[in-house]
């Protein structure tokens, strides 16, 4: 009898935990507390892009992105969706790589889509290269690594992505750097 009650209690706890896990939004941060968690993803196996998109999708308040190359349609869609949810989004990108050397027009198209949606975008020409690649989400989480926001990074390059969830101390340091980059940049004006 005691064993049956134990198994019944264990089964009930398992079902409760499973129902919480299944109800948890797929785009939410993995820990809804102040517990710091680090997740890693890689390219070209797909886990890098998936982690970037999940981090951006978790935003409820703000996203600040610093990018070297910026052409990835899935990232553009994630930022547009965040903006539509009421998230305050702003972007700072390398000027040379995204404007002067953009032979395909993909970077201009990506940046134009953001600006047309009301997302402030600035191009930074203060350095030989604005080579930082990171996002700060809700002033709490940092996504960083070698990963450029491009299809090439997602599908062909060997890249890494780290998300440091629930690290407001690191987020503050990254936000300070991001603000400096953004302040040095020029507002991007679409051609159309």
Image: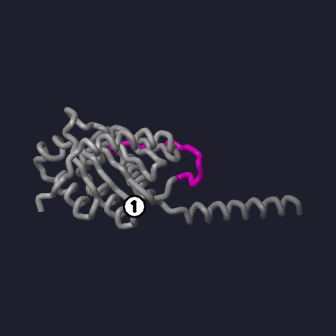
Query: Is residue 106 placed above or below 83 in the rendered structure?
Result: above
Instruction: Report the label total.
Output: 1
Q: Is residue 149 left or right of residue 17?
A: left
At 50% across and 62% down in the image, what residue appears?
A: 25
Q: Position of residue 22 (x, y in %)?
A: 56, 64
| 190 in relation to 37, above or below | below
**Extreme-top residue of the structure:** 128
Residue at position x 47%, y 39% in the image: 170
Indicate the secondary structure of the residue bearing disc 1. Answer: loop
Q: On the image, which quarter does residue 130 sit in?
A: top left
Q: Is residue 33 magenta?
A: yes
Q: Looking at the picture, tell me which residue is in the foreground, 90 or 156.
A: 90
Image coords of residue 27 (percent x, y): 46, 59
Q: Magenta segment: does it hold 157?
A: no
Seen from the viewer's position, the closer of residues 14 and 121 is: 121
Residue most toward the right? 1
The residue lying toward the viewer, choosing from 173 and 145, is 173
State the extent of the magenta-drawn residues as a range: 30-44
Q: Please identify the quadrant where the N terminus is shown.
A: bottom right
Q: Which residue is mark 1?
A: 87
The image's colour scheme reads one colour
Judging depth in this view, the residue of 19 and 146 nearest the camera is 146
The image shows residue 82 at horizontal and vertical percentages of: 37, 61
User: Residue at the spot x=12%, y=62% of the render?
Assistant: 192
Q: Position of residue 31 (x, y in %)?
A: 56, 52
Q: Residues within 10 Å of mark 1 (few under 14, many from 20)?
A: some
Residue projecting furthest to the front: 183
Q: Residue at x 14, y 47 (%)?
A: 99
């Amino acid at each position: 009898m005691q064993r049956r009650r134990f198994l019944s209690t264990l089964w009930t706890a398992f079902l409760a935990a499973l129902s919480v896990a299944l109800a948890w939004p797929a785009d939410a941060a993995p820990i809804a507390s102040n517990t710091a968690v680090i997740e890693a993803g890689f390219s070209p196996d797909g886990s890098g892009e998936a982690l970037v998109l999940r981090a951006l999708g978790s935003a409820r308040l703000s996203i600040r992105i610093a990018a070297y190359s910026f052409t990835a349609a899935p990232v553009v869609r994630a930022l547009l969706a965040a903006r539509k949810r009421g998230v305050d989004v702003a972007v700072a990108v390398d000027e040379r790589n995204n404007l002067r050397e953009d032979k395909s027009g993909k970077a201009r198209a990506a940046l134009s889509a953001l600006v047309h949606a009301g997302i402030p975008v600035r191009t930074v020409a203060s350095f030989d290269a604005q080579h930082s690649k990171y996002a700060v989400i809700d002033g709490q989480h940092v996504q960083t690594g070698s990963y450029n926001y491009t299809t090439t990074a997602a599908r062909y390059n060997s890249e890494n992505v780290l998300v440091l969830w629930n690290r407001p101390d690191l987020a503050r340091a990254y936000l300070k750097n991001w603000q400096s980059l953004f302040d040095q940049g020029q507002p991007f004006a679409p051609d159309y």
